[in-house]
Image: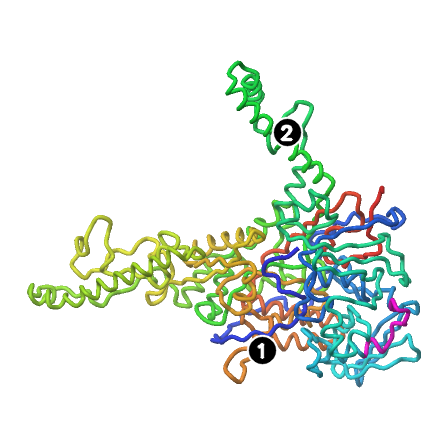
Amino acid sequence: MAHVGVPRGTARKRRSVALLVTGVLTIPVLAGCTSDSEGPTPVAAPQDITPVSRERVTEGSTLTWAIDAVPATLNTFQADADSATTRITGALLPSLFPMDARGEPRLNPDYLESAKVIEQEPKQVVLYKLNQQAVWSDGREIGAPDFVAQWRALSGKDSAFWTARNAGYERIEKIERGKDDLQVRVTFSKPYADWRSLFSPLYPKEVTGSPGTFNDGARTTLKNTAGPFRLRSVSKAKGTVVLDRNPRWWGNEARLESLVFRAVEPEDRTEALTEGTVDVADIDPATANSIALAARYRGGNGAPPAHGPGAGITPAAALRSWALAHGSDEEAAETAKAARAKNREAVAAYAAEQKSLRAYAVRKSLEPAYTQLALNGESGPLSDDRVRRAVARTLDRQELADTVLKPLGLPAKPPGSHLALAGQPAYKDGSGALGEQDTKEAQALLADAGWTRGGAAKKREDTKAGSEAGKTAAEEKTAKAPEEKAGEKAGKVSEEKEGEASRDEGMYVVGDEKPGDRRADDAGVTAQDKQPGGAAGAYAPAGTAAPAPVSVKDRLGKGGKPLTLRFVLPSGPGSQSLRAVGEKIVEMLDAVGISTQITKVDDDSYFKDHIASGDYDLALYSWPATAYPATDGRPIFAKPEPATDGSLLVEQNYTRVGSDHIDQLFDRAVAELDAKASRDLLKQADARIWAAAGSIPLYQRPQLVAVDKKLANIGAFGFADPRYEDIGFTGR
């Protein structure tokens, strides 16, 4: 299911250009940055897939799995690859180290007998020993030529290959055949801790061997595969991708005969489930609630329905309706009969829908991704790390997590790391480097940065009294004439601006008297501001500023300018949770005097036109978890680099907040072959990311999946990659 504000791909590098206004980041004393003796934390929520042994799964049948759209490409290394690309290729291509239920990479014995570092000096060497049964669907053995072709395509040395990411491949020096055709020897020019991330998925050399086949040959077809399924057809017209069993598959035979991926928009999932056109679908809380209600639906036998049409009809109302329908007043009887018939039809249709939905169960867990509040440190107030930290210290992260997860019955502990989630080996709660929610500390940080209460009210310079107030009438008239004309002109301009503001339906300022009343830069109070029912100067000498409204007095400001942050939120039907969290954040910031200008934008443009381009102060979006944080985390948190033209290369660091020290810790971690030492370096990096306060993790995303109750080994997978060959129906 599509999620608004989720960047595509877990490790794909984006390069965006923006301007940078840097601020000096002061790092507080960081405690707990070194290794500790604590054991691994438990996974926040286990996977929910109804696991059963393969023997209990019926052989045969077809499963239909909802995806958002037929993918534009089946090449996961291209820029327009998406979650559907990953899901489909997972059943077709080799994955050498799939993720397990704890988010750790595990050797896949279907493809590898072993894989390990056999040399560290003078160069790192990894030796892969392939499963001797592993073959492509054309019968050719999987071997060194496939590894070589993929390395050359993704190394970044040949720009003819249109690749979106090459992390790790650029560190390879050479690939050779080992003692026999089943051994592949990979030598690295620089140490690479995340070598297990490479060659997954592994494409056949027929795809990666030339720019033409790499760029275009694997977009809509994969003629050669090596998974439990093979590709039968792709139809954008029908909105389907159809897989069937791979007859050359050497592992456990797939229990399903065929697997159909059907394009169903997220807002159409309830209808698709009701009609029975899909067996599995990622769903939103509203659809999950519909399925839960269906399980409790009882109707018929003369009893009123539990909910839906007819549920509100009391016995007395039903009796009156019957009496009218059978009464002597023919006109009233006809009206009552028509109403009763219409209600019966609605009840019957709703009952049929509930019966269909009762065939599904909602399997739920936590998605391997977290939603964060991003603070854009490129310019404005948030370029000051004190203001960013103050915003962060204002937030009650537990309340925000509860808002999303508690209604779903899921654990709601806020994530303590940017680089791993609870249960993963690299996880450690580093939020102490920033500090817990503390309103007083937040206010102190803001005051230290010069933002004080009442600082938003502008002071006028023309507040003189005495002899200057005693001008002659002629002098006053002469002096005021041009001012009055200018005032009339300014009034017209002001009216025009107010008209424009009233038409700007997507924006309002929290902290002003009325939403959208005036823009943040017009918040100052002058002597022309009138008290209700009075004229300027009626309650004080002419030229004396009128008392500032309470909202302006309470708002933080500096030099007459209020502290107002532009909060960009998506407006579509699939982003209700983000908006609910956003509203809570606005309330928390408003309580300390920080105004928030909310701008709601279309879901389609939310990420591309606002997050990636830096057109926001505050925003909510998510990052997926990874088994390789040293590789995948660096482009997200790397310090933006100034280009020769003065612009800024931000990679995936859309907050524009970073430091040289963080970069150095990532560089050391990715080159450290001792796993524990590498994780310790990542924990130090995470502590400094917390202290920089550009990204504030709020909650792990919920994962809700509607699944036919007869299906096993499928549902909310959590961290783990699906085992497609084990999925199937029971009791058929």
Relative image position of residue 120 (x, y in whole percent) = 80, 80
* Magenta span dominant secondary structure: loop
Q: Which mark is residue 521?
A: none
Q: Secondary structure at mark 1?
A: helix
Q: Is residue 2 left or right of residue 504?
A: right
| Neighbourhood count class around disc 1 (C-alpha, 10 Å): few under 14, some 14–19, many 20 upward | few
Q: Nearer the viewer, residue 589 or 432?
A: 589
Which span is picked out in magenta?
136-148
Mark before the other along the chain sequence, 2 or 1: 2
Q: Residue at x 58, y 78 (%)?
A: 660
Q: Amino acid at mark 1?
A: Asp
Q: Amino acid at mark 2?
A: Pro
Kindly indicate the quadrant of the structure image that contains residue 151.
bottom right
Relative image position of residue 516 (x, y in whole percent) = 38, 55
Residue 455 visible somewhere in the drawing: no
Q: Nearer the viewer, residue 670 or 437?
A: 670
**For the N terminus, which image quadrant?**
bottom right
| Neighbourhood count class around disc 2 (C-alpha, 10 Å): few under 14, some 14–19, many 20 upward | some
Q: Is residue 147 magenta?
A: yes
Q: Is residue 66 magenta?
A: no
Kindly indicate the quadrant of the structure image that contains residue 76.
bottom right
Q: CA distance from mark 2 to mark 1?
A: 64 Å
Q: Nearer the viewer, residue 5 or 316?
A: 316
Vertical arrangement, residue 276 with respect to residue 247, above or below: above
Relative image position of residue 153 (x, y in whole percent) = 75, 78
Q: Which mark is residue 660?
A: 1
**For the C terminus, which image quadrant?**
top right
Reading the image, the residue beneath label 2 is 305
